[in-house]
Amino acid sequence: MQNYVPGLEGYIPTAIIIFVIYIAANVAIGIWGMRKIKSADSYYTSGHSMGSWAVALAFGATCYSATLIIGFGGKAYDVGTSLMWVAASNIFFMTYLVWVVLGKKVRKLQEKFGAFTVTEMIVKRYRSETLRPILAVVVAFSMIAYTVAVLTGTARLFEVLFHIPFVWALIIVIFVIGFYVTTGGIVSTIYNDFLQGIVMFFGILLLFLYVYSTTGFVSGYEELGSRLGDVYVTMPGRISWWGLISVCIVTSLIPWGMPQIVHYMFIARDAKAINWAIPIVTIWSFIIVYGIYYAGPMAQLILGPGIHTDKVMPMLIKTIMPSLGIGIVLSSVAAASMSTMAGTTLQASFALSRDLCQKTFWKGMSDEKVLTLSKLVNIVVIVFSACLAYLRLANIAEIFMVGAAASCAAFVPILVCGLYWKRGTAAGAIWCAVLGFLTVLVWSMLFGAEGQKAGGLHAIIPGQIVGWITFVLVSRKTKPLDREFVRKVMS
Amino acid sequence: MIFGLSWGVFLAYVVGLITVALSLVTAFAAKDEGWKVDRIDD
């Protein structure tokens, strides 16, 4: 078995120079975004000024984090080429279909109600103020969990690759992200996400090209089959069919029910921006996901067997790329995580300041005051998440999966039905959010965050079943919303 | 096996390429829509 022992390697000075330039660009965008913030509307929705490229790359960069590049790249090394189906389901359900089904409808509904947050849009859609604090709590919980997971992963990456202590890595990450998110709100976040999307694209493309030049495509797959046996290159690989299907569902459902991702549909300028964002984000995602799920198994040929899952991709990068390439790819991995974390912290602060404080407890608060409160809450969320990350209460994947599953259980049925089903009611939405959320929490506590004690049945699946059934049954049994109101919503 | 891939893995590549093609068709086939949205004052 090969052991990966980090030392003071030659790539570090070049990689650090590239990374520092990249961080400086992030901070500069934060300052620039701060100047563009003139109202609560521009802080929360960028005044709907974003074109297709900004919307597409910001969405993509937020969807895919180091969890994909490091975690799932390593998993593909373990499981085999069958994980290419995760790439296929991600690009179809998580990227293309989510924009076709939700994109324009969400954007129009947001404008019909003048909503600043996804929660606010749903509250107005179902005409229920009771729903607001419930969804705000779900969003705050899931976004903080997601933030803790990504923060831990990013800091861990910095720790391993740049050889700095975990606590200092945490401080660097929270300073950079905290600065540009708090000062520049959604404007800075979108433009930084855009920059991060470009860095990710070229980083993963470079990685693919270096792996391709080392192993080839057809010859690489043939070599894998001859060295590791048919199981490694056929379906379902070194995993059960149920396990493969679960991974496809869990990873593909996330953008349908996580408000920080749905929120990116709010910022699009118009229908044209959304129409053209679809191919841009799909092609971008194709390079990212297929690049990763191609490179992961090929690492078996380049590095040999027996590498720890989480160390496969960093080792692969170090082994086949020159210093400059390593700097770009490392920046792209950090970029992926930082863009994801920026979205989650911003959403947690939106939920606590706008939905819980301004709209539930202190209804007279002005938009100017809530803007200041949002920035303060954002700092609190980042520091609180960093403290939880420092305590290392659970592993990254567990925290991430519980947060994502809880949010999807509460949001997916009421969001999709809110756009397409006239019969949905406020009571249905309330019970769906409460029972779906609780199902995920109880299932995770009883059977483990990844359903380890339930044959690998992840909490997201029972959470979805309970959420959808509850929503439809309760809606059918309760008084429908006013027909004229529903007509306006659906028009 | 096809191109060194099993049929299952080959199909995963096909799904990806079809999705890319679909996304381009979706964008090119979209009509010029006006963006007149009536506010709902509730």
Image: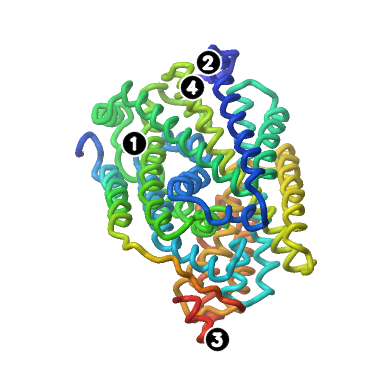
> Which residue lies under the disc numbered 3?
A482
Q: Nearer the viewer, mark 3 or mark 1?
A: 3
> Which residue lies under the disc numbered 2?
A11
Q: Chain of mark 3?
A: A
Q: Looking at the picture, which amino acid does disc 1 mark?
A: Tyr
Q: Crowding near pointer 2: few (<14 within 10 Å), some, many (20+)?
A: some
For the residues labelled 3 and 2, the Cα–Cα distance comes to 64 Å
For the residues labelled 4 and 2, the Cα–Cα distance comes to 7 Å
Give the mark, 2 or 1, whose residue is nearer the N terminus: 2
Q: Is the residue under label 2 in contact with that under label 4 (CB below 8 Å)?
A: yes
Q: Looking at the picture, which amino acid does disc 2 mark?
A: Tyr
Give the mark, 3 or 2, whose residue is nearer the N terminus: 2
Q: Is the residue under label 4 in contact with that under label 1 (CB below 8 Å)?
A: no
Q: Chain of mark 2?
A: A
Q: Looking at the picture, which amino acid does disc 3 mark?
A: Asp
Q: Residue at x 40, y 27 (%)?
A: A206
Q: Crowding near pointer 1: few (<14 within 10 Å), some, many (20+)?
A: many
Tags 3 and 2 both on a single chain:
yes
Residue A47 — which label? none
Image quadrant where residue B25 sits: bottom left
Q: Nearer the viewer, mark 3 or mark 4?
A: 3
Q: Is residue A448 above or below residue A117?
A: above
Q: Looking at the picture, which amino acid does disc 4 mark?
A: Ile
Give the mark, 3 or 4, whose residue is nearer the N terminus: 4
> Which residue lies under the disc numbered 4?
A326
Q: Nearer the viewer, mark 1 or mark 4?
A: 4
- Tell which of A330 and A239 is nearer to you: A330
